[in-house]
Amino acid sequence: FKRCPFLGHSSRTPFDIPYIKSAKIVDASSFDNQASSHMEEVYFSRENEVSSRKREFLDSSDLESLEQGRKTNRDPSFRYDQFFRDQITLKKKNHTYRIFKEINRSASTFPIANCRFPGKTTDEITVWCSNDYLGLSRHPKVISAVIEGLKNHGTGAGGTRNISGTNSFHRRLEVELAQWHGKDAGVLFNSCYLANETAIATLAQNLPNCEIFSDAANHASIIQGIRLSKRPKFIFRHNDPEHLEELLSKSDRSKPKLVIFESVHSMTGDISPMKQLCDIAHKYGALTFVDEVHAIGLYGDTGAGIGEMEGIIDDIDFISGTLGKAAGNIGGYIVGNHEAIDTLRSYCPGFIFTTALPPATVAGCLASVNILKSDEGKQLRSKLHSNVATLFNKLRAVDIPAVKTPSHIIPVHVGNAEECLRASNDLLLQHNIYVQSINYPTVPVGQEQLRITTTPLHTEEMMDYLVDSIKSVWKHHNIPFLWPSNLAGTSSISARIPVSV
């Protein structure tokens, strides 16, 4: 095999694929013009491809030998490429294949954005499905905090929290989050998916003979954490305290247990009967782990979530939350008592072995939390819930199948994956409205929906245009207008959430 003219010595992999073993500085003037003209090229190869760059240095016999080596050195008994093609084909056939739309939101005109999508480019659109529930991602105080953090500390953390990655902002935010939720301590993660996954797995693995009791509708991050723990799991029906007690009553009381559920369900908009679930869990000696992701910033006097609103924070042993939704930034966290949080900090691989969040990002999160706790935060929450009620009433006034929920989430039922995707695309391409279709596996088959979320920044004029556009698309595609009453959200505390009946 020829020596690379730029990086020097080369060798071969076990599959006779060349890779760089070492390099040395060479004098380009000693090579011909063709080689000199390609000095900027990086010489490397991958197992599954011969790059165009490498081909320039191989003659035909080399290429033939290389291709033949590939064909003869891999066992052909399993067709990997065909397997991957079949997986994607299946997603396309059942209309769950995802094409990412480029939504370039504007900090100055939110919820207006520009969109890049096949058949649609750069036109202004209105976003109706963002989890930036209060628009804090574009708040001047948050942006200013991030800019100052960048100026003072640069763009990255520089390492894991244990190795040079802990900044004063990290500590300040963890203290702030713990106090916000009335807990002893908190630990910050790079996302709430990671927080749930690694915290649940770590707790269950370290508690001897731990058993897990999980709500049937729990988020994928919780499910993955349970899987990683490899501990016995028992699934209780969604928001069903009686079924939870039935399962717990059959458990060995001497074994440690985790009861895990969400306060606000992300897709249905249900709110769990938290007090009942916590009381039953503690009756049988279990710890409670509550995901407040879609409640943080939106409920309670200071925005700390449903636990604060219901006055039951002390009944919750672990609260997981996010800084990527109502807080308008990124990051997740767990709060609880000091010993439990210190255990997570000391044992969670998802915390120990990953680079810390950038200080500038954490500075923005800290600014957001302070806004959420302030009078301004109360005003934003009040305006949000007022807009939710107004929009829901407008949708139902024209028989659009908006499902009544006790929260800020407005699901519009479709019930068919193909129709749901078509409706979402038509709203974007024909009406400049972005509402993402929600299909399996995010929701069960038959419960496909458009998940609408308004913000304090959406105007009534925007709402009217949204309702007229949905009505037009529904008529065009003959989607049923009657809404299924069996999908209406129910909650024991629904009367306390300011959403219209």
Image (cartoon, rainbow, N blue to C red):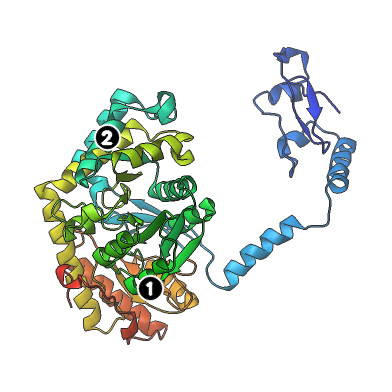
Residue 414 position by quadrant: bottom left
SS of the residue at dot 2?
helix
Residue 238 visible from this viewpoint: no
Report whether 73 appears left or right of 478: right
Q: Can you tell which mark lies on residue 363?
A: 2
The residue shown at (16%, 72%) is 495
SS for tag 1? helix
Asked whether 351 or 404 is in front, the reply is 351
Image quadrant where one finds the N terminus = top right
**Residue 125: x and y, percent?**
32, 60
Q: Say above or below: 39 vs 467.
A: above
Percent across and percent down for residue 420 are 43, 74
Q: Quadrant of residue 411?
A: bottom left
| Picture residue at 45% right of the left edge, 67% below the top | 235
Give, as a three-letter code, the residue at label 2. Answer: Ala
Tell which of 68 and 54 is nearer to you: 68
Mark 1: which amino acid?
A: His
Image location of residue 72, percent across then percent down: 88, 47
Q: How would you rate the neighbour count of disc 1 (Cα within 10 Å): few for under 14, some for 14-19, many for 20 or more?
A: some
Q: Residue at x 24, y 38 (%)?
A: 366
Give whichever of discs 1 and 2 has the lower sequence position: 1
Please state which of the two labelled residues, at mark 1 or mark 2, is closer to the viewer. 1
Give percent across and percent down for residue 14.
82, 35
Between 56 and 300, the one nearer to me in the picture:
300
Q: Is residue 161 visible?
A: yes
Calculate the distance from the C-alpha at mark 1 to the C-alpha at mark 2: 43 Å
Where residue 385 sits, quadrant-wise, is bottom left
- Image quarter where the C terminus lies is bottom left
Above or below residue 170? Residue 450 is below
| Residue of label 1 | 243
